[in-house]
Image (tube, rainbow, N blue to C red):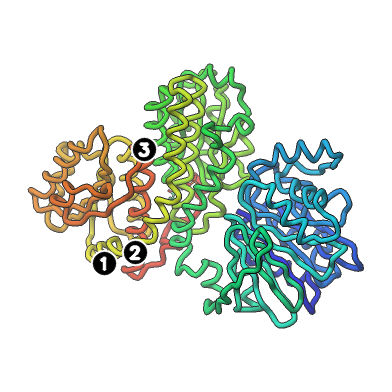
Amino acid sequence: MCGIIGYIGKSKAAPILVDGLKRLEYRGYDSAGISTINNRNIIVEKDIGKINEIEGKTNFSKLDGNIGISHCRWGTHGKITRENAHPHVDCSGKISIVHNGIIENFSELKEMLIKKDHKFKSLTDTEVIAHLLEENYNGDIEQAARKALQQIEGSYALGILCSDEPNRLIAARNESPLILGLGKNENFIASDVPAILKYTKKIIYLENNEMAVLTDKNVSVKDINGKVIDKKIHKIEWNSELAEKGGFEHYMLKEIHEQPRAITETLNGRVENGNVNLSEEINLSEQELRKIKRIVIVACGTSWHAALAGEFMLEELAKIPVEVEYASEFRYRNPIIDEGTLVIAISQSGETADTLAAIREAKEKNAKILSIINVKGSSIERESDSVLYTYAGPEIGVASTKAFTTQLIVLYIFTLFMSGLRKTLDKEKIKGLIERLRKLPLQMDALLNNDEEIRKIADIYKSRKNALFLGRGVNFPIALEGALKLKEVSYIHAEGYPAAEMKHGPIALIDKEMPVVFVAPKDIYTYKKVLGNIEEVKARGGIAIVIATEDDKEIKKKADHAIYIPKNLYTLSSILAVIPLQLLAYYVAVDRGLDPDKPRNLSKSVTVE
Ligand code: AGP
């Protein structure tokens, strides 16, 4: 996820662009850059680091010119370097662009362009667009953009400048968000409302496969074939604080709703045409990977729950023995690790002290380290042999939500990758699993837009003192995560348990005050046993709230409340089941008058022991 802002109008562009970038920094902050046109020359200033750091190192905000584009990066392709920062420029130096998204066919396009003697300066997918525009440019940048976009596959939000045409700013969008801001003798493009709310409240939302041509006095929107589209102008009523949260009341709710896009961006480029492409990201050879006899996963908190789900995936599909360890325990236990062990560290922040210490302990025993990280350039990343990123974008809310589901996605595609390598699944089976995996973002969208039942349940039980969360198999870690979400943002004492464990003690807790949340999507494994557990709770006067598969009539008869999720495969259903649990915790906290973004005693990253 990156941030883009562009300007054309009566004022100097650079100060407006820098101000806008600072309001978009939550979208990415590993590097940033600006490009303007002055005296028919493209000027570019860019560097690694946060906006304020770059401002101190360059004359970033003093560039001349009344038209410009700018970008803050959350890198997907290419390391964090100045060359890989945006904007990118073509060979002629006449065209500059900024981009948010992933160009899936960039390798073949780059090969074609190099054959046509284009010289590349970066390792990014984005730079391909600059040279493709140059290749298609015959004196009309709008036409060149249209032709280039018809050759591109993937997601993009684009800002384009051409020094031959200093009075036009071109924008285009497919999948990655982009809005147009309409001012008085000035117009804007931006990834998100906060960047331009200070200058205008009149917004046009670009849709997929739409382009826009902006001058200082006019904005026209066309489809990718050049047909003019009449767009509605929206009046934004948010204040700037609300704008930072995309109109949501809290970052936690915004980030819960960002999950479909976060999962799409985490999948992009990794599961194409029925294959899993991780080889370029994993710095371990196929030979080293085949030698792995055992996997140990170390993590804390929510990431530890993801690790437990990963254990089910890897053992079930890739047939690799997996142990999951609390990083804080692992680091002091003198663990048995050898060169046949792959240690996986899972961490949203990449800075958790216990997890960092755990991988240092493993490295001393010659283990290879693969980390699953959301924050690029973090300490755990730098000390790992290999990194698989979750592309959730910056997670601001203390309670981890979109990082968790994207961790599950990365674990799932890593499982498919290893299953193919070890031939525990054939190509056809893997292709089928990828097809079901690809359905998740849309299924999640449906869940997110239908949360009335969850709001109602939250209101009924918001004052309870305790709650139990139960699940079996891969739904046990999901139950643990549901309990952690509730306890950390609402302060209700909540515990997660394997459903079958109830009879070994916890069932003594059941009474009419105790809501019990069952994670019980229909599956061939343990569904009937969970029905029995629900009956045990009901027989003792407990309250059964069940996360169930849509059209499950059986559950309806037994549960006090049923929250339905779309049908999918066993492990993929468990990822869908996370959404209602996150929403339940959020609404209970808000109903209790608490701020879910800043829960007491907690911090976003626990960088101390
Ligand atoms: C989860 O909602 C909590 N914020 C916390 O348990 C968190 O998952 C844990 O501290 C690990 O953080 P990490 O993923 O950044 O390593």
514 relative to 93 in the view: left or right: left
Quadrant of the rendered image containing residue 36? bottom right
Q: Do the residues labelled 2 and 1 touch (CB within 8 Å)?
A: yes
Amino acid identity at mark 3? Thr
Task: Give the Cα separation between the discs numbered 2 and 1.
Answer: 8 Å
Indicate if the residue with disc 2 has its beta carbon within 8 Å of ligand 1. Answer: no
Give the secondary structure at mark 2: helix
SS at mark 3? Answer: helix
Q: Residue 443 carries which label?
A: none
* One can see residue 85 in this view: yes
Q: Quadrant of residue 598?
A: bottom left
- Which residue appears at 54% of the width and 32% of the height? 276
Name the residue type under label 2. Tyr
Ranked by sequence position, the earlier of labels 1 and 3 is 1
Q: Name the residue carrying label 1.
A: 459
What residue is disc 3 on? 571
Residue 140: % across, % down: 82, 61
Q: Residue 587 carries which label?
A: 2
Q: Residues within 10 Å of mark 1 (few under 14, many from 20)?
A: some
Residue 257 placed where, x, y %?
45, 58
54 sits left or right of 334 in the view: right
Q: Is residue 21 in sight in this rendering?
A: no
Which numbered disc, 1 or 3, marks the residue closer to the eye? 3
Residue at 38% across, 37% down: 309
Q: Where is residue 587 in the image (x, y as percent from the top left)?
A: 34, 64
| Earlier residue among tags 3 and 2 | 3
For the point 54% across and 44% down, the residue is: 266
